[in-house]
Amino acid sequence: MTGTRLIQNFSGMQAHLIVAPHTATDTLVTTLLKLGLSVASVRPTGETPRLDPAGLESERALVIVDGDLPLPGMAASGVRDLPPVPVLGLVGVEAPSRLKGLLQFGATGLLRKPIHGASVYAALYLTVNEHGRRRALEEQLARHEERRRGRRHVVKAILRLMQERGLDDDAAFELLRRDSMRARVPLEQYCEALVQARPAVPAPARRIALSE
Amino acid sequence: MTERHRIGVLFSTTGPYGLVGRAMQNGAVLAVEEVNAGSLGIALEPEVVDPKGEIAGYAAGADRLLDAGIRHVVGCYTSSSRKEIIPIFEKRDGLLWYPSHYEGFETSENVVYTGASPNQHIVPLVQHLLARGGRTAFCVGSNYIWAWENNRILREALALAGGRVAAERYFAVGETEFGQVIDAILTTRPDFVFNTLIGVSAYQFLRELRRACRARGIDQPRALPVASCSLAEPELEAIGPEAVDGHLSSSVYFSSIDTPRNRAFTAAYAARFPDGPTPSADTESAYIAVHLLARALARAGTGEVAAVRRAACEVAVEAPQGPVRLDETTLHAALTPRIGLSTASARFTILAEAPAPVAPDPYLVRSAPRIVPVLRRPRLRVVPS
């Protein structure tokens, strides 16, 4: 598998701006428009900013949030959670609590206030592509986790074949691998179906006659 | 009553790229003289500073001009010099009128760009090459941003068209030893060579490639055409007669444009600067910058930066290349892309020309794919049995 595809042209994306009222965002908005984005403002009035991530189109949306606001209000509960859309953090007060807030919010890029037009494209590039890379990694991790859970079925299936056909473990695995490939399903899934389709035949009594 | 405005002129007319600097300064000076003799009702008083191609000279020069109360400076050729002084213009609220083609990905409220941005030079060149059936490129360039960025755009366009870049080779600025890369090109036999070498490196490369092709009986302009987006008339003269013809170049201006307006411009230039250098796209761009500035000053009725910037977007210049206007959002100019083929007399025959000025797109928002295209490796390979 190749790495994540890099996005370099942000035209057609919508930036949702979460900043306090009266914040100077002229330069930011002007630059975003030059870069082909549309801008929607989500201006909280004294409350914790709230944005429904389900309402955002993950492919085209981007959240820009001001770190000086009380955070969070979106999906992120811990640093590990990746929000469904890329988040760009605006840094005003450069204090650990504010930076932590942005990180917990899921920011993958930062832009220092006051905003300078010439740093917006670089921040967007990093935010969007780093988010994409982390999402790809999380998906990959989820796939591995899924397969790891399925390994017990593989072990069971190998044991079954060894018992039923008198194969050694390598030969049993090879057979399962080949059959799963023919059936075009992942090995784990194939083995699970195999084990569940036929309840286990009790193994012939093989006593190790220590007492005999 | 004639209103007088002092303006700064900041070109390196001496130093490593003094030839280009002189060509640009001449364009600016010619325009100043035309404005002063014209009927706009304003007079320009140029204050000339030569940074001598040294990066520190640009910052010092910009400070000196702004200290003297000047708000408008026409100048810079290289991107590094421009990047160096933009913060000064932003901090002190001056307006830099930057007259050169460049690699894009920049806008500033304190810079007016009258040269071509990438959608006006490299993009039309790539389209032209693809239309001619070019699918395999060999890229040779000077090792800096101009070459890297142009090669990226070419690589992506070829990827989308199912073509490929056979190799990318970079050389230090000023390098003149190209034997190995020419051998590699002759072995690879690409459809075309994409040249982003600058200055003496480019001239030497073109001479050596032509020589190597002659020695092997290869008709280089036909079999191995070289395409560039920075090759201009003064450079053709520098290449010399042995290898001057048959090179493709993409530019918004060639001195051979056959219109009454351009004939008047080249005649006026030749009369004023009989010793040259020959006018190039950058000369015309500096000429446009001064004319645009003069019209904006006349319209604004003041030298105040915000008013002049606003006015600059409301006026138009009938330039040697055709009509030129500024785009309000990016402060870049709408220009007319052309493809030229160099001739033995160190001029260009125009092969293709956009029917109308093309709006600038410095961030390639309208001209580049959303996702970086990747060159596909062939899935199957022919292996000798």
Image (cartoon, coloured by chain):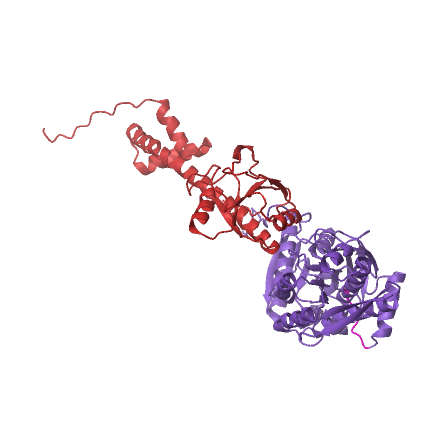
Chain colours: A red, B purple
| Location of residue A186 by image quarter | top left
Residue A199's place in the image compared with B295, above or below, is above
Residue A191 location (% of width, % of height) = 38, 30
Q: How many marks?
A: 0
Residue B122's place in the image compared with A56, above or below, is below
Residue B124 location (% of width, % of height) = 73, 54
Asked if residue A19 lies in the magenta stretch, the reply is no
Residue B39's place in the image compared with A187, above or below, is below
The residue shown at (31%, 30%) is: A156
| Location of residue B45 by image quarter | bottom right
Residue projecting furthest to the left: A211
Q: Is residue B175 visible?
A: no
Tell me the magenta residue range: B275-281
Query: Overall secondary structure of the magenta stretch?
Result: loop
| Location of residue B177 by image quarter | bottom right
Asked if residue B278 lies in the magenta stretch, the reply is yes
Looking at this view, is A190 or B32 the one in front? Answer: B32
Looking at this view, is B182 or A48 the one in front? Answer: A48
The residue shown at (37%, 23%) is: A197
The quarter of the picture where the N terminus of chain B appears is bottom right
Does B93 sit left or right of A55 as displayed?
A: right
Looking at this view, is A97 or A15 the one in front? Answer: A97
Residue B2's place in the image compared with A21, above or below, is below
Residue B60 location (% of width, % of height) = 63, 72
Does A112 sit left or right of B214 as displayed?
A: left
Q: Is residue A16 visible?
A: yes
